[in-house]
Image (tube, helix red, strand yellow):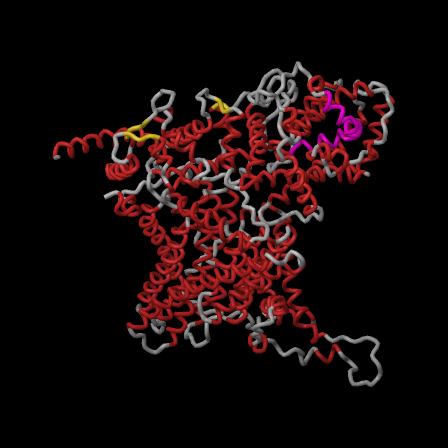
Amino acid sequence: MGTTQTRSENKYDDLVTKTGFSPEQIKNLHKRFQQLSENEETISKEHLHSIPALANNPIKKQIIDAFFDKRNQHQDEVGSFQEIGFEQFLMVLSHFRPPTLKMSEEDKARIRKEKLRFLFNMHDTDNDGTITLAEYRKVVEELLSKSGTMGIEAAKAIADAAMLGVASTNVPHMKPDEFYEGITFEHFEQILKGLEMETRMHIRFMDVNTTTMRCGKSTS
Amino acid sequence: MEFSNLRRMAPLLFTLTILSLLQASKGEIAPEPALGVTILPPVKPDNGPQAFPDADKANLPVFTMDYPRIQIPFEITLWVLLASFAKIGFHVYHKITIWVPESCLLISVGLIVGGIMHSVHEEPPAVLTSNVFFLYMLPLIVLDSGYFMPTRPFFENIGTVLWFAVVGTLWNSIGIGMSLFAICQIEAFGVQDINLQENLLFASIISAVDPVAVLNVYEDVSVNEQLYIVVFGECLFNDAVTVVLYNMFTFVAEMPVVEPVDVFLGVARFFVVGLGGMGFGLCFGFVAAFTTRFTSKVREIEPLFIFMYSYLAYLVAELFAISSIMAIVTCALTMKYYVEENVSQRSCTTIRHVVKMLGSISETLIFFFLGVVTVTTEHEWNWGYILFTLLFAFVWRGLGVLVLTQIINPFRTIPFNMKDQFGLAYGGLRGAISFALAFTLPDNIGRKELFITATIAIIIFTVFLQGISIRPLIEFINVRRTNRNLDTINVEIHCRLMEHTMAGLEDLCGQWSHFYWKDKFMKFNNRILRKILIRDNRAESSIVALYKKLELQNAMEILDSVSGDVSAAPSIISLYEEKKNSAKPKKKFLAPDLKNMHDILSKNMYKIRQRTVAFTSKHALPNDIQTKEILIRRHASVRRSLRPGSFQSSYVPKSQKYFSLPAGKSLDSRFTSARQSYADNQETMSEVGYPSRRARFSRPTRSSSRAMMPLHRLDTLKEAPSVSVLDERQSDGARMNRGITRTNSSHSESRPLNPSFHDNSGSVDNLRNDSREAEEEEQQSQPVAPAWAADPRDRSTQNPLLRRPQWNLKK
C-alpha cells in the first residue's frame, strides 16, 4: 500500500514536469480519469461517448477524437490510439492550461501555436496536413447541427464562403491552373491572425476536487 | 430681454427638457414637485411690460407676443440646442476629440458660458434639484449604458465586475470617508465641524467613477476585452452602489445618534436594495420582451414599450426605495436580446438611437451645467480639505485596485497584470453623477458648499488631468489589446468551435466555469425562454447570423453602387456608345473614357465608404429606407439558395477537394447549358453593368487605406491601356474575391489570372463573368438592346443569388 502510494507520487512528479500541471490538479484529474474509465488503466472512446454532460455538445465527436489523436501528444507521431492512458489524457488537457503572469512573449507565441495546432487537428481528420473543403464543411455542419433545419442547410453555404475567404486571404496570386486544395496550417494561422487567443481556450483546472463536489458519492 | 431671461433660466432647462419629454408619455406618476418648486415666476416684472406696451387698449391687437407662455419650453430648447451645438463644434476639427475628451470640452464651454453669466451678474437658478435629477436625468444616463452593455463579455466577467463595483466602491467610500474624518480632527484646517457621517456621505459621492471618456479611449486603442468590460461594468454598477450609499448616508447624516444596530441594518438594507432592484428589473424585462411579441401590427409604437417598461421598472423600484439603477439596468439587459429579435429592424434602430440620444443629452447637460455652476456659485474653498480629498481619492483608488486584484486574480482564468491594474486605477475619473449627487445634497448638511466645491475640484482635476493623459499613457505602456473588429466568417466559426470545445472538455474532465453555465443557460433559453418570449422562435446560430449580416451588407453595397450609377448613367451610356462606335471596343480606352470611369468610380467609392462607416459604427445604424426590404429579400434568397438541390449542387465539381477550376478549361465549355440560361442577363450586364460591377466588388472596408485600393487598380488601367478581355476578367475575378470574402489581400497591380472559385455566390458571378466574356466576343457587332429591359424576376427564378436589386431601379 505504502509503496504504491510513493510510486504514484513519483509518477505524478514525472507528469508534473511533462505537462506543467500541479500535483493537486493531476490528482484531481486522475480521479476523474478513473471515474470515466471505471477504474481501468486506459480509457476508450466508448467511455467518453457515454458522458451524459457531453450529449448536447454539437462537436462531441471531434472533441473525443482529439483525445485519441497522436498528434496532440507533443510527439511527432501521427495516427490514432485505440485506448489512451492517463498520461495521454493529461497531455491533451495540457494544451489548455491558463497562462500565468510570468510568461514570456515567446512562451505565449508557442502556446498560441499549440492551441491553433490543436484546432487544426480537429479539422484535419485524415492527417494529410490540409483541411479540405469537405472536412471544413463537416465541422461547420456539426457546429450548426443544433440550431434547427435552417442551420444544417446553411452550413454548406457558409463553409463554402469561409473557404473562399481563406483562399483569397492566402493565395491572392493563384495561377488559374492552381487549385486551392485546402487550408494548410500556415494558412490556418493566417486567417486567425488577428484573433486573440490568450484569453480563449483555457480551462481553469481547480486545485480543489471539483469532481467530488459535483458527483458526490460516485467518485468515493 | 431674451438674453437676460435666457441666462436666468439656464438651469431650468435640464429639468424641463427631460420633464416634458418624459412626462408626456408616462401617465402613471406625474411628480411635478420639482417643477412647482423651482420654476421661476413666469413673467419678469421689469421686462414684461415692454413686451406688451399697450396691453390695456381694447382694440384687437394686430401683433402680440406672449413670451411668458412659451418661456419655459423655449428656453429649454435653446439650452439643449446650445449644448448640442457645442458638441457639433468639437467635431469640426476631429483631432480635438482624440486628444481631449468631450467631457473636458463641455465643461470648458460651460465655464465660458458661466463666465459670461457671472460678468453680467446673473445667478443660475437652482433648478437641478434632487427630484429632477433622480427621476428624469439619471434613468436616461443609466439606461443608455445598460442597454449598450456588451452582454457576452459582461457575463464572462460578471464576478470581477461586481467585485470591483460593489466592494471597490465600498472600499473607496469608507477609506476616503475615514481618512477625511481623520483630517478633520486637525485644528489647523478649521473643519472640525464635519462629522463622520457627513464625511462618509461626501466620500460616497466622490467614489462614483464615470469613465465615459476613458471608455472612448479604450475603445479607440482597443484594449483587451477584460479590462474594457470591467471598467464599463464598474461605472454602471458603482452608480447603483453609490446611490444606495448616498441615500443611506443622507439618512444617517440627519440622525442625531448612530447606534451599532443601525450599522447592521444598513448592511442588510444594502443587500435588500441591490437584490430587490435586480428582481424588479428581471420582471419588467421579461414582461417587456413578452409584450413585444405581440407588437407586429403596431410597429410605430414598438419602441415606446421599451422606454415605458424601463422607466416603469425605475419608478416602481424608486417607489419601494430600492435600487432603481439596478432595476433599470437589469431590465435593459434582460429584454435587449429578446426585444431586438421581436421588433422590426426599423424599430430596433429607433430604440438604439433614442436611448443613445437621451443618454448623451442628459450627460451633456450635466457637464455643461457643471461648468456654469463652477463659475457662478459661491464657493467655500478650503485648501486643506480639498487637497486631501484629491490625494485620498487618488490613493484609495490605486490601493483598492491593487488589493482587490490580488484577491480576485486567483479566481480569474486570465489574471490582471500590472498594466491592466494601472488601466483600471487610472481610469477612475469622476463625472456627471458625482456632481449631480453633490449638487442635490439636502440643505441641512452644514458644509454643503464645501462639498460641492470639493466635488467640482475633483471632477475637473480627474477629467482634465487623467482624461487627457490616459490615452498617451495607455499607448505608452502598451496594454494588451484585443482586436474587436474581426467579423469574418472564418473567425466566427472558430470562435464558436473553441467555445464548444472548451465546454466539451470541461464536461469531460469534470471542471466547470462560465462555459458550463453558458451551455446550461443556452439550453434553458432555447427550450423555454425563447418559446415564450420570441415570436419567431427558431434559434439562430451566431455563425448564421453573421453570415446573414455580411450578406446584407453586400446587398446594401450593391444597392449603393446602383444609386451611384443612376446619377452617372449618361456617362455610362456615352461610354458605351463610344465603345460601340469604335467597333473593337477592347482596343484602347481613350483619355475621356478613363476620366469618365474615374468619375464614376470615385463617385461610387465615396458613397460606399460613407455608407459602410455608418453601417458598421456601433450605435449608428443605417437610416436607409430600403434596409428592411433588402433584409427580407436577402432572407428569402438565402433560404431559397440553401434548399437542397439548389443551383449549387448542379455544377460543383465531383471532387470537392478542388476548389477551383483549371483555367485552361474554360467554364463555358463545361457549363454550356448554364450559359444559355443566363444569356440575356449577360447582355444586360456585359457592357453597361461593368463600371458598377467594378465598384460593387471593390469591397469597402473599414480602414481607409483598404478602401483606397480600387483607385490603384484604375492606375493599372492607365499603365496598360490595351486592356483586353483577359485583363478585364482578371481584375473582375480579383475584385470578386475580395468582395465575397471581405479580406484584404494585397493585390499587385499587374496580376496574373485569378482562379475561379466555386462557391455559392462566387461561382455564379464567375460563371457569369466567363460566359459574359465569351458572349461579348460573339456579340461585338450585334446591336445591343437597352440594358434596362431585363426582367429581374426571370433571373430570380433561375438563381436566387442573382436577384440583384439594382436592376429593378433601372427599369
The residue nearer to you, when weighing B213 against B788, is: B788
B755 with respect to A213 (left or right): right
Figure disc tally: 0
x%, y% of residue B104? Answer: 53, 55
Seen from the viewer's position, the closer of residues B83 and A141 is A141
Range drawn in magenta:
B672-699
In the depicted structure, whether residue B207 falls above or below residue A105 = below
In terms of image quadrants, where is residue B601?
top right
The image quarter containing residue B754 is: top right
Q: Residue at x 48, y 22 (%)?
A: A130
* Res B687 seen here: no
In which quadrant is the C terminus of chain B drawn? top right
Q: Where does residue B131 sit, x and y in percent of width and height?
A: 52, 71
Percent x, y for residue A45? 36, 31
Q: Is residue B657 visible?
A: yes
The dominant secondary structure in magenta is helix
Q: Position of residue B520 (x, y in %)?
A: 42, 47
Quarter that holds the N terminus of chain B: bottom right
Q: Residue furthest top?
A: B664
